Image (tube, rainbow, N blue to C red):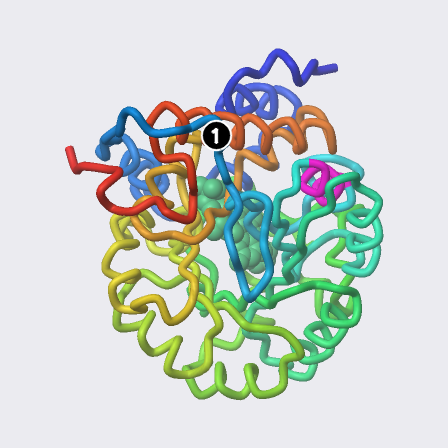
Amino acid sequence: MTDASDCRRPLDYRERARAALPAHVWDYIEGGAGDELTVAWNSAAFDRVSIVPRTMVDVSACDLSCELFGARYATPLGVAPMAYHQIAHPEGELATARGAGAAGALCVVSIFASARLEDIAAARSGAEASGPLWFQLYWLRRREVMLDLAARAGAAGYRALVVTADTPRLGDRRRDRHNGWAVPAGVRAVNLDAAVMASAHRRRPGASALAGHAEEAFDPSATWHDLEWLVARAPLPVLVKGILDPADAQLAVDHGAAGVIVSNHGGRQVDGAISALRALPPVVDAVAGRVPVLLDGGVRRGRDAFVALALGATAVLIGRPVLWALAAAGADGVAHQLRLYRDELENLLALAGRPRVRELGRDAVAHG
Ligand SMILES: Cc1cc2nc3c(=O)[nH]c(=O)nc-3n(C[C@H](O)[C@H](O)[C@H](O)COP(=O)(O)O)c2cc1C
Ligand SMILES: O=C(O)C(=O)c1ccccc1
């Protein structure tokens, strides 16, 4: 059993998780598309940005809060939407939601969650310092299923919807093809119809069952008109996830997006795609304050969150490191992981003489 307190920085959970998980599950979580160039670039991009500290500033209290859709969020850190948390831990999303709730962090629940979205909301409200939940959708051929899920999320107290735009089909996950990866039989995307999900569990040598499933279920013809259609019918604000081009950010806002998430899907879609951090400033400029801009991809330290916030993100989402902590130590691991990020960010705000997240700007960093 892992003692979470041995982990001193977010990356320390990585080896714990690798040791705890079967190799094919580890490969699915950790892997990216193609040669995994973009996976590496996402985190490397943060290392090329320096912090410029100020001095003689009163930092006796730091304020990490941010504002999203008229509400105050306790921290600008959140959990990125990821499918099937039960592959990492038997308590799956219920544990993730409890852990994120305890840390006061936003949690974005995937459409492929392995627990019912209503049960996740209930698990979450039990946590002491409960934070907000958002729900993520893919563009499904069966549009009525998207609307049904959107209505359920609204009724269950979720505060926003995220529609993922970068997945007309699944990227080429070579590790998964090599492993003949399929979602294990005991783990189910229970918010979706079992008949629709059957192909995700069908093992075929040399192929990823998820790729086959995505081809069957995802609608590759979705365009900005479909976003307008969704926004007009959704009971919640809709953010678009997977934006890298400033022109797309502009189009998203023009077609009703309430926010954009700069993301290359953790390097799992287009190998060689621009890193999320490098894509951020032009998107922030194109959006020009009309809606919030979030970022995910490669955030591996509190320092990385600081850099993204300084370059204009309102909040940042964390993907794989949350699943590492979940695999290693369940809900306590997730809470601890998010606190490691938060504490490192808080410490840096103080040391860099920039005590308020909401006032962080580009002057706080330098390139190179
Ligand atoms: C195992 C796994 C499953 C994922 N499933 C989804 C998903 O269901 N929906 C989605 O929009 N993004 C999904 N993503 C992408 C994440 O939301 C996020 O963009 C990415 O993981 C962020 O990068 P990071 O892992 O480097 O922090 C998934 C990522 C991983 C690692
Ligand atoms: O694995 C993923 O990155 C992902 O987004 C996904 C896509 C289809 C089904 C499950 C997860």
**Nearer to us in this view, 6 or 197:** 6
Q: Provide the major secondary structure of the magenta segment.
A: helix
Residue most extreme to the left:
368
Tell me where residue 131 appears, x and y as whole percent: 68, 48
Tell me where residue 254 appears, x and y as whole percent: 37, 82
**Nearer to us in this view, 175 or 270:** 270
- Disc 1 is placed on an element classified as helix
- Residue drawn at the location 37% of the way across and 71% of the way down: 290
Q: Few, some or many C-alpha atoms within 10 Å of disc 1 (few <14, some 14-19, many ≥20)?
A: many
Residue 21 lies, with reference to residue 273, above or below; the image says: above
- Residue drawn at the location 73% of the way across and 46% of the way down: 130
Locate the N terminus by quadrant: top right
Residue under pointer 1: 346
Residue 104 falls in image quadrant: top right
**Nearer to us in this view, 143 or 201:** 143
Tell me where residue 239 appears, x and y as whole percent: 50, 68
In the image, the residue with mark 1 has its CB under 8 Å from the nearest atom of ligand 1: no
Q: Is residue 357 magenta?
A: no
- State the count of labels: 1
The reply, left or right, for residue 195 in relation to residue 310 is right
The reply, left or right, for residue 348 in relation to residue 155 is left
Residue 180 visible, this angle: no
- Magenta span of residues: 95-102
Residue 302 lies, with reference to residue 108, above or below; the image says: above
**Nearer to us in this view, 226 or 363:** 363
